[in-house]
Image (spheres, helix red, strand yellow):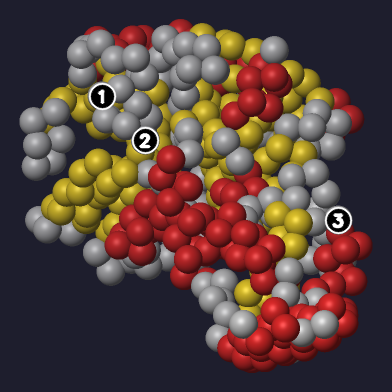
């Protein structure tokens, strides 16, 4: 071969020329590949970060551990995505991060100490709001939730406790006085708070009367003998507003009574149940809207829906399990009525959740209003978030583990 007849120096020079041509060919191929890769401009960049221990301050980002959006210049959206992070690591080997992110965004991410992930609104796969929303709402369905207690205000705490224990068979579970804030709480129910739905009565010093309004309906209590319970209520001086008899349009025997503050209780005749305090009824102005909200934001199931055209109302039972074993939310729509006076007596329902931060995001995405951003309560460190549904009814979500610690 001609190559073998060359001198050693000639062979060395020829190898150098061959290697040079190889390098030039590889360089051309690399440049061609880079031209096909999208380069994010700072204006179109969407950055995703996930950091379990360090979160941006609210002055720069409004965020929760699950999802954060900020429109203040960097158009930042936080959500955890393994595939996006791996894709970025592969990309970062070929493209300097300062080119990919823009200097301003890169500086922000480094300052936060977060794992960096990126996507753009150009050719790179974008972070889709639809995908983010679906992730949150899917999480809601799998969250371990339970209705914990219902909170309302009373004018005479001792009198109310006496009525509930002697007439309704509840037990006083605990009582706490907060003199610095001038109020006292009493928790009553049919079993321990860690496994039963209970009432939380609030007495504010010096306030002996509240306006219940027209929006709150009633609490439901399952009893084995409605007539017997009504007789006991009468014997104790209680007020019966509907004598025992079949419900309109049905066969269930019911009766209505009022407690000393005027809150209505529906007595429902049922067999033994693990959750006698079985209903909270609230009136809403748009039933379909309310059903959709409680399904998406609260993760409740529509257990049943009943229309009563003769009496011009429709009800929907929402909850986390069957009515005969769990407390449910009864939403009532009265034909043609879209707004109600909520008064100042009834306060809220508390619901347990595995993550108050994700819960707040789901509520926002579902059209609810956050009235208290997720985070720990001062002093006791129990994490909560509070919200209003589309009709203005308030609910509070409480971290499950923190709630159990508080009971201890």
Closest to the camera, between mark 3 and mark 2, is: 3
Cα separation, mark 1 vs mark 2, equals 12 Å
Q: Earlier in the sequence, mark 3 or mark 1?
A: 3
Q: Nearer the viewer, residue 368 or 356?
A: 356
Seen in the picture, residue 391 relative to 203 is either above or below; the reply is: below
Q: Position of residue 77 (x, y in %)?
A: 67, 69
Closest to the camera, between mark 1 and mark 2, is: 2
The residue to which callout 2 is attached is 320
Seen in the picture, residue 350 relative to 235 is either above or below; the reply is: below
Can see residue 361?
A: no
* C-beta proximity under 8 Å, tags 1 and 2: no
**Marking on residue 227:** none
Q: How many marks?
A: 3
Q: Position of residue 10 (x, y in %)?
A: 82, 86
Q: For mark 3, give the secondary structure.
A: loop
Cα separation, mark 3 vs mark 2, equals 39 Å
The residue to which callout 1 is attached is 324
Q: Position of residue 366 (x, y in %)?
A: 48, 62
Crowding at label 3, few (<14), some or many (≥20) Cα neighbours within 10 Å? some
Q: Quadrant of the C terminus?
A: top right
User: Furthest residue to the front?
Assistant: 5
The residue to which callout 3 is attached is 113
Crowding at label 2, few (<14), some or many (≥20) Cα neighbours within 10 Å? many
Q: Nearer the viewer, residue 362 or 114?
A: 114
Q: Nearer the viewer, residue 72 or 52?
A: 52
Crowding at label 1, few (<14), some or many (≥20) Cα neighbours within 10 Å? some
Q: Earlier in the sequence, mark 3 or mark 2?
A: 3
In the image, taking residue 85 as reference, residue 336 lies left or right, namely: left
Q: Toward which corner of the image does residue 17 lie, by quadrant?
A: bottom right
In the image, taking residue 239 as reference, residue 170 lies left or right, namely: right
Cα separation, mark 3 vs mark 1, equals 50 Å
């Amino acid at each position: 071969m001609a190559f073998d007849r060359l001198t050693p120096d000639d062979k060395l020079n020829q190898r150098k020329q061959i290697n040079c041509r190889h390098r030039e060919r590889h360089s051309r191929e690399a440049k061609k590949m880079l031209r096909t890769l999208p380069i994010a401009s700072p204006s179109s960049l969407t950055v995703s970060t996930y950091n379990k221990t360090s979160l941006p301050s609210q002055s720069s980002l409004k965020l929760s551990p699950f999802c954060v959006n900020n429109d203040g210049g960097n158009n930042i959206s936080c959500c955890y995505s393994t595939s996006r992070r791996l894709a970025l690591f592969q990309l970062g080997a070929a493209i300097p991060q300062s080119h990919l992110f823009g200097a301003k965004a890169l500086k922000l991410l480094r300052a936060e100490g977060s794992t960096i992930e990126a996507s753009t609104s150009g050719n790179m796969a974008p972070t889709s709001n639809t995908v983010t929303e679906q992730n949150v709402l899917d999480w809601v369905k799998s969250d371990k939730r339970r209705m914990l207690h219902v909170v309302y205000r009373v004018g005479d705490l001792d009198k109310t406790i006496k009525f509930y224990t002697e007439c309704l068979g509840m037990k006083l579970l605990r009582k706490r006085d907060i003199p610095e804030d001038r109020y006292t709480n009493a928790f009553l129910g049919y079993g321990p708070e860690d496994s039963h739905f209970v009432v939380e009565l609030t007495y504010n010093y010096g306030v002996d009367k509240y306006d219940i309004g027209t929006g709150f309906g009633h609490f439901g209590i399952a009893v084995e003998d409605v007539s017997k319970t009504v007789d006991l209520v009468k014997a104790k001086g209680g007020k019966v507003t509907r004598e025992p008899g079949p419900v309109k349009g049905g066969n269930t025997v019911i009766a209505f009574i009022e407690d000393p503050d005027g809150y209505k209780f529906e007595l429902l005749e049922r067999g033994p149940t693990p959750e006698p305090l079985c209903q909270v009824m609230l009136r809403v102005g748009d039933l379909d809207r309310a059903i959709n909200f409680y399904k998406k934001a609260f993760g409740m199931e529509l257990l049943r829906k009943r229309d009563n055209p003769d009496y011009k109302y429709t009800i929907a039972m929402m909850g986390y399990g069957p009515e005969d074993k769990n407390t449910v939310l009864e939403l009532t729509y009265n034909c043609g009525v879209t707004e109600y006076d909520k008064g100042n007596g009834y306060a809220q329902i508390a619901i347990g959740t595995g993550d108050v931060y994700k819960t707040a995001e789901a509520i926002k995405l579902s059209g609810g209003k956050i009235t208290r951003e997720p985070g720990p309560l001062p002093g006791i460190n129990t994490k909560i978030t509070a919200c209003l549904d589309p009709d203005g009814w308030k609910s509070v979500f409480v971290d499950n583990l923190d709630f159990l610690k508080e009971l201890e």
